[in-house]
Image (spheres, grey):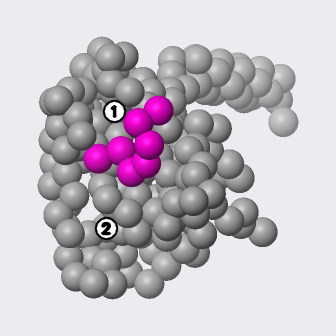
Amino acid sequence: MSNPLKSTLALAAALFVSAAADASAETAHIFWKDLRPATQSAAENVGLPMIAAKLPDHGETLSVNLQDKSIQLAGYALPVDRDGDLVYQFLLVPWTGACSHMPTPPPNQIVLVTPARPYKMSEAYQPVAVTGALKPDMEKSQLFILDGVSIIRSGYSVRKADVVSVETVPDTITLPVNSPWSFLNKKKN
């Protein structure tokens, strides 16, 4: 390989690494609290389930300062549109059991995610991290659960999202031991 070609390849590689570093530096790693107004109590402070009906604004106050920003958020994936183990759209929720085993969180605590590529999911409530442009907008999704269909309102969406499996969700909420849904606290092995 000639020296000019080696130099060109080295420069291209350096620019690629630099661009990737800049892109990751621009991605804000956010938490669920960042999606609700500072005046809204966290779920663990009001007792679970934290439902929209308990909130003065019904959980419809969204964080517009994150609009169109590249974010990364970890949560639990609940499939909305799937074919076998391939998921084409899912709800990202802050704790296991949200929307199907217990009442739905407020819209500002639900993100509708459309992966850039179908995501292979082995089970509902799989912990994932989602990266992409966050759009505050109220949307409705049909969620098919064992006892019928639920209409779930999400306050945010991320389209063409990069989705990766994670071991833990840093700001997850553990249900109280006396909760009828405490079976959802089990550790996944």
Q: Residues within 10 Å of mark 1 (few under 14, many from 20)?
A: many
Q: Residue at 50% of width from left, 51% of height from top?
A: 95
Q: Which mark is residue 134?
A: 1
Spatial CA distance of label 1 from label 2 is 18 Å
Percent of width and height locating residue 5: 74, 28
Taking the image as shown, residue 135 lies to the left or right of residue 132, namely: left
Q: Residues within 10 Å of mark 2 (few under 14, many from 20)?
A: some
Q: Label 1 is placed on what type of residue?
A: Leu
Based on the displayed image, in which of its 4 quarters is residue 118 positioned? bottom left
Taking the image as shown, residue 77 lies to the left or right of residue 56, namely: right
Mark in the foreground, 1 or 2: 2
Q: Which mark is residue 80?
A: 2
Q: Secondary structure at mark 1?
A: strand
Q: Secondary structure at mark 2?
A: strand
Could you tell me if residue 16 is visible in this image?
A: yes
Percent of width and height locating residue 113: 35, 51
Depth check, front residue: 55 or 168: 55
- Residue at the far front in the pictured view: 178
Based on the displayed image, in which of its 4 quarters is residue 37 positioned? top left
Q: Label 2 is placed on what type of residue?
A: Val
Could you tell me if residue 163 is visible in this image?
A: no
Query: Bounds of the magenta span?
Result: 45-51
Percent of width and height locating residue 185: 63, 61
Depth check, front residue: 92 or 118: 92
Q: Which mark is residue 147?
A: none
Taking the image as shown, residue 151 lies to the left or right of residue 110, namely: left
Q: Quadrant of the C terminus?
A: bottom right
Percent of width and height locating residue 165: 62, 55
Q: Residue at 51% of width from left, 18% of height from top?
A: 26
Taking the image as shown, residue 169 lies to the left or right of residue 44, namely: right
